[in-house]
Image (tube, rainbow, N blue to C red):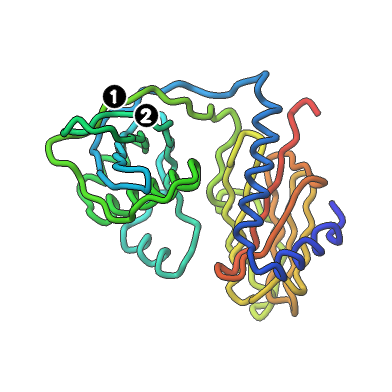
Amino acid sequence: MADSKLLVPELSEAEKMGAETMRFEELLRQASKELQQAQTSRPESTQIQPQPGFCIKTNSSEGKVFINICHSPSIPPPADVTEDELLQMLEEDQAGFRIPMSLGEPHAELDAKGQGCTAYDVAVNSDFYRRMQNSDFLRELVVTIAREGLEDKYSLQLNPEWRMLKNRPFLGSISQQNIRSQQRPRIQELGNLYTPESPRPEEGPEKPHLNLWLEAPDLLLAEIDLPKLDGALGLSLEIGENRVVLGGPQQLYHLDAYIPLRINSEESKAAFHRKRKQLMVAMPLLSVSS
């Protein structure tokens, strides 16, 4: 196991900075960039042709923007939860629900008046899209997540107000997209993974909810919900090659999780998000041959 002292100072530092989100996102961008550069010699992607769904119109400081919401069976579906369950998760500010989507490159187009504009293609799973067609709630949620995803990926500022085009499922042409080939297990929830059983008294430490997903073929991200904490003080985190162990102050929390992937513990980073009350961990993965 990695020495927990290597990570604790980073948790404390992130807590004091008062800008946890920006720091963690910068960490992820840097890690993702390094991993993508290292993987150029061994591409792990599949080309897909998304099918048209519906098109929304909004705008940015640079002019009109259209987002083509498309779908493809090659994109993984989100977790199967009811709308009531999803609404409860959102009200409790939980980040465990994710909608996998592919964000395409911007392409210049002409609108109905012949004026220049920019269009983006965003694809979701086909089965989920069919479910979304019968739900205004899911449709608005997908549009919101797609808009925020485009803003983050392309450093945009899009108007949150939008309207759906009538009788026009897309603007311009929908290009093929490259998505990551799932050559490794895709992990979204820890419920189907092994956690060592250790009898604890009913008043003992609580096992926090752990959400895992692959941000890149060689980068595993984790969010650990710690609603009883206001900061990282007293937290201990140990990361081994295939194990994550967390301890909370005053024995409030204890997590001992087996991860069926090889983690580079020396390069792993963590930061505590005060507003969400979550510990966020970035864990680069070791190659199979190393």
Task: Say if mark 1 contacts mark 2, CB within 8 Å.
Answer: yes
Vertical placement of residue 170 versus 23, above or below: above
Q: Residue at x 53, y 27 (%)?
A: 181
Identify the residue under disc 2: 107
The image quarter in which residue 86 lies: bottom left
Q: Residue at x 37, y 62 (%)?
A: 85
The image quarter in which residue 29 lies: top right
- Disc 1, SS: loop
Q: Residue at x 21, y 49 (%)?
A: 163
Residue 9 left/right relative to 172:
right
N-terminal of the pair, mark 1 or mark 2, is: 2
Vertical placement of residue 151 versus 76, above or below: below
Picture disc at residue 55: none
Q: Residues within 10 Å of mark 1 (few under 14, many from 20)?
A: few
Picture disc at residue 173: 1
- Disc 2, SS: strand
Q: Position of residue 5 (x, y in %)?
A: 86, 61
Q: Kindly report the distance in space between the C-alpha atoms of the residues bearing marks 1 and 2.
A: 9 Å
Q: Position of residue 218 (x, y in %)?
A: 67, 35
Q: Residues within 10 Å of mark 2 (few under 14, many from 20)?
A: some
Vertical placement of residue 114 versus 240, above or below: above
Q: What is the quadrant of the C terminus in the image?
A: top right
Residue 214 left/right relative to 73:
right
Q: Position of residue 263 (x, y in %)?
A: 74, 42
Amino acid on which disc 1 is placed: Ser
